[in-house]
Image (cartoon, helix red, strand yellow):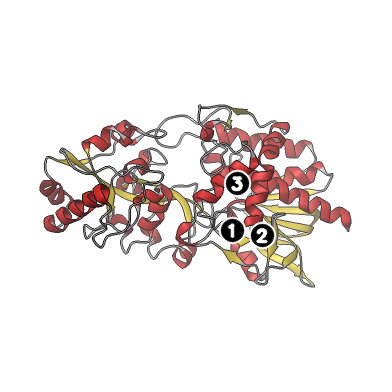
């Protein structure tokens, strides 16, 4: 089957539907290809709890202040042009989504919850997305696209980019029926999410044992768009990092224990050890950092958080759906003992090494003495000593929500090659792209919804300007 449109978008999540709606507003013929065949096709945008933020704070704040937050969480490693574009257009993106019918409410007093989707996500453990937050948002954007003459074609997977004389001129796709489609277009937008659901790509870029990492996501992000772009010379950046949270280890088999509650607040207050009973990372750098560090262990399912009852009654009750009490009510468990020696035994760890690790950690907290162990930052998260029983531990796993790296683009969504030159006709937006969250161990979470909405909108505007010029 042959089709010809002005713009073809690969992926029907927030980034893809934002780009499609924006070009449709300019009267361009746009077709969105979505691999999922169901009306409520699954993707991370549909699962979202709906908090639009940048760096866990108000994305509608004064742009320089928002930019400073982003620079702080990424330790200054985010691509400057992308950071500037995100923060300069964040307020406008929220207003634009509202103009399409997406509804926002203030779900809490802090910046994290100041711009939340309505109806809000349910504050319960496990998955609760139907008729809430992201589900309603995607339905709203799909209806908006249809009103403007755009089309969303479900059950169709893009497989290869069509290149003519160095320019991307369309995609080759396959329908669920097995029929092949060749779609010619003036511009192609890749917006099919991250590659977290592709074990081969996770092994290639992130960790040796993807099967021992929890898929804390819709499992639809397979990285096909990244592979298609790489095949035509696109540059990839920041692919070693992902956004995710620490979960109880039983979440690997028990759906009631993910995506919430997470146990990050206990990890950033106490200490995290591996199967040898030793610390291996700086817990004070935050839950996303620690989650990445756990995933990169020789055995990602060997990690344990250790803390005492003061921490359980303090930071354990912090954050949304805190571990205390939601972990226990969801069916998770603490490993508890009156002494550290007994706790080591219940964890199957060498008691001598375990005792040395706790003693060294307590000295680090009290005096800053490193004693050959990793540092412990305290700029954001206070380090709590492990002093008085009962003592607790949580056996954990690393939950990957989406990959933060991917296709390199400029601020207008144009895909860049190895020499940072735009590949004509090819664009990308959302979780399939990289650079915004930085690179290396310093990478930090910017916010998946803000990234997808802002750059989906900007990519649409960039395409509309380019096609009008030609």
> x%, y% of residue 104?
61, 29
Quadrant holding the C terminus: bottom right
Q: Residues within 10 Å of mark 1 (few under 14, many from 20)?
A: many
Q: Residues within 10 Å of mark 2 (few under 14, many from 20)?
A: many
Q: Is residue 461 left or right of residue 357?
A: right
Q: Is residue 346 left or right of residue 265?
A: left
Find disc 2 in the rendering and name its residue.
409
Q: Earlier in the sequence, mark 2 or mark 3?
A: 3
* Mark identifier at residue 67: 3
Find disc 1 in the rendering and name its residue.
435
Viewer-proximal residue among 233 and 330: 233
Viewer-proximal residue among 7 and 151: 7
> Which residue lies at the image location 57% right of the left edge and 56% below the top edge?
78
In space, the residues marked 2 and 3 are separated at their CA atoms by: 19 Å
> Which residue lies at the image location 66% right of the left edge and 59% below the top edge?
409
**Figure check: 308 above or below 277:** above
> Which residue lies at the image location 28% right of the left edge and 34% below the top edge?
328
In space, the residues marked 2 and 1 are separated at their CA atoms by: 8 Å
């Amino acid at each position: 089957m042959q089709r010809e449109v002005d713009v073809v978008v690969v992926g029907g999540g927030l980034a893809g539907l934002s780009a499609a709606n924006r070009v449709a507003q300019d009267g361009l013929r746009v077709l969105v290809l979505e691999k999922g065949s169901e009306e409520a096709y699954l993707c991370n945008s549909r699962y979202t709890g709906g908090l639009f933020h940048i760096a866990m704070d108000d994305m509608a704040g004064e742009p320089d202040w928002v930019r400073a937050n982003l620079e702080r969480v990424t330790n200054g490693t985010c691509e400057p042009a992308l950071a500037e574009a995100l923060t300069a257009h964040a307020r406008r993106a929220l207003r634009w989504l509202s103009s399409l019918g997406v509804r926002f409410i203030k779900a809490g007093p802090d910046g994290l919850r100041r711009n939340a989707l309505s109806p809000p996500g349910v504050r319960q453990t496990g998955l609760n997305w139907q008729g809430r937050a992201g589900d309603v948002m995607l339905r709203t954007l799909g209806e908006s696209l249809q009103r403007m003459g755009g089309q969303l074609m479900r059950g169709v997977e893009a497989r290869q980019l069509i290149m003519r004389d160095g320019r991307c001129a369309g995609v080759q796709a396959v329908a669920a029926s097995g029929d092949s489609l060749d779609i010619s277009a003036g511009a192609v937008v890749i917006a099919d999410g991250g590659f977290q659901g592709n074990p081969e790509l996770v092994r290639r870029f992130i960790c040796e044992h993807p099967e021992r990492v929890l898929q804390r996501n819709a499992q639809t992000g397979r990285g096909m768009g990244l592979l298609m772009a790489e095949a035509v010379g696109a540059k990839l950046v920041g692919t070693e990092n992902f956004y995710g949270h620490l979960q109880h280890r039983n979440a690997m088999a028990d759906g009631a224990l993910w995506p919430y509650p997470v146990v990050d607040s206990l990890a950033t207050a106490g200490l995290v050890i591996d199967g040898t009973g030793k610390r291996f990372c700086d817990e004070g750098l935050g839950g996303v950092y620690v989650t990445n560090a756990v995933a990169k262990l020789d055995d990602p399912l060997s990690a344990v958080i250790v803390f005492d009852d003061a921490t359980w009654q303090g930071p354990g009750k912090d954050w949304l759906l805190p571990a205390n009490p939601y972990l226990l009510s969801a069916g998770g468990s603490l490993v508890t003992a009156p002494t550290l020696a007994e706790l080591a035994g219940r964890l199957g760890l060498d008691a001598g090494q375990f005792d040395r690790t706790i003693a060294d950690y307590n000295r680090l907290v009290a005096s800053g003495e490193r004693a050959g162990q990793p540092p412990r930052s305290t700029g954001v998260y206070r380090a709590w000593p492990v002093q008085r029983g009962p003592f607790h531990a949580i056996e954990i796993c690393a939950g990957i929500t989406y990959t933060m790296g991917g296709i390199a683009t400029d601020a207008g969504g144009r895909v860049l090659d190895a020499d940072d030159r735009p590949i004509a006709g090819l664009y990308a937006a959302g979780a399939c792209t990289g650079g915004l969250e930085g690179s290396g161990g310093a990478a930090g979470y910017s916010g998946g919804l803000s990234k997808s909405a802002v750059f989906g909108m900007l990519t649409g505007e960039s395409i509309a300007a380019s096609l009008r010029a030609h």
